Amino acid sequence: MLGESATLHTNHTQKEDERICGYLKTMDSKKSQVEQRVVADFCSEMKNISITIFSSVSQSPNIPVNEKNVADFIKEFSEMGFILQDRIEREES
């Protein structure tokens, strides 16, 4: 399930990058330097989030979860959930 989740997330962010960031970047010539920077930061942030999530999720199947590390596993995935939730809320607002 983790591998499938990583694949779905990667596919989604690639589409987002192509569609949203591509569109926003084509409009750069009509934007101020501040607006251009916001767009660049927006796209860069999502790429960094994607790399972090894909890296964590794709490594997880190789690390057996047991009594010693289950708390760390839950913490790591909870943090990723909060990062995504924050990003989605900011996108929609």
Image: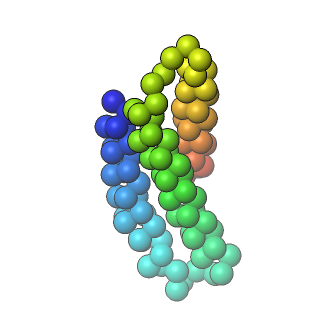
Relative to the observer, which residue lies in front, 12 or 74? 74
Relative to the observer, which residue lies in front, 19 or 79? 79
- Name of the residue lying farthest toward the bottom: 29
Q: Position of residue 87 (x, y in %)?
A: 57, 47
Q: Position of residue 84 (x, y in %)?
A: 54, 42
Residue 46 showing in the rendered view:
no
| Quarter residue 77 falls in | top right
Compared across the picture, whether 30 is left or right of 12 comes to right
| Quarter residue 80 falls in | top right
The relative height of residue 70 versus residue 23 in the rendered view (above or below) is: above
Compared across the picture, whether 19 is left or right of 51 comes to left
- Name of the residue lying farthest toward the top: 67
Identify the residue at horizontal 44%, vertical 47% (top origin): 54
Compared across the picture, whether 34 is left or right of 65 comes to right
Residue 49 showing in the rendered view:
yes
The relative height of residue 91 versus residue 20 in the rendered view (above or below) is: above
Identify the residue at horizontal 37%, vertical 64% (top origin): 19
Identify the residue at horizontal 38%, vertical 50% (top origin): 10
Q: Quadrant of the N terminus?
A: top left
Identify the residue at horizontal 49%, vertical 53% (top origin): 51
